[in-house]
Amino acid sequence: MKLCSDCAHFRRYIHTPDDGSCTHPSVVWIHPVTGAKRQPSALLQRTSMVSTSCGQEARLWEYDPGSPPEHDEVEDLG
């Protein structure tokens, strides 16, 4: 399963450790008044039905080398 927490574009929120934001370049937008970069919540990206969002299929997901390997990539040593 491709978890947001294992994605290279996931940034954990400091105040809410169970959630974070998505920093994928295609979903970051510039606030039209302040010019600040805005990053949507990872949960919003994964639950959105919009074709340009990550969605349940994890279309924008990229493996973060610092994360544990995918379950199906781990060899059975037993």
Image (cartoon, helix red, strand yellow):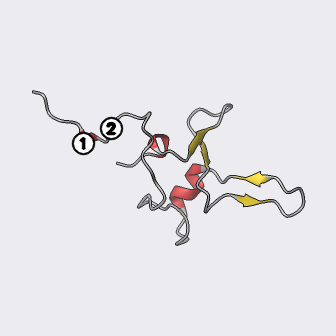
Residue furthest to the front in view is 65
Q: Is residue 76 left or right of residue 71?
A: left
Percent of width and height locating residue 69: 32, 37
Q: Looking at this view, is 51 or 73 the one in front?
A: 73
Label 2: few (<14), some (14–19) or many (≥20) C-alpha neighbours in 10 Å:
few
Residue at x 34%, y 48% (from the top left corner): 1
Label pair 2/1, CB-CB below 8 angstroms: yes
Q: Which residue is mark 2?
A: 69
Residue furthest to the top in view is 78
Residue 44: quarter of image: bottom right
Q: Amino acid at mark 2?
A: Pro
Percent of width and height locating residue 25: 62, 58
Residue furthest to the left in view is 78
Q: Which mark is residue 14?
A: none
Residue 27: quarter of image: bottom right
Q: Secondary structure at mark 1?
A: helix
Q: Report the quarter where the C terminus lies.
A: top left
Residue 18: quarter of image: top right
Percent of width and height locating residue 76: 14, 33
Q: Amino acid at mark 1?
A: Glu
Q: Which residue is mark 1?
A: 73
Residue at x 68%, y 52% (from the top left corner): 39
Asked if 11 appears above or below 30 in the picture, the reply is: above
Label 1: few (<14), some (14–19) or many (≥20) C-alpha neighbours in 10 Å:
few
Question: Disc 2 and disc 1: Cα gap in Å?
Answer: 6 Å
Residue at x 55%, y 71% (from the top left corner): 50
Asked if 61 appears above or below 49 in the picture, the reply is: above
Residue furthest to the bottom in view is 51
Q: Looking at this view, is 56 or 23 the one in front?
A: 23
Q: Is residue 36 left or right of residue 5?
A: right
Q: Is residue 40 left or right of residue 36?
A: left
Percent of width and height locating residue 10: 55, 44
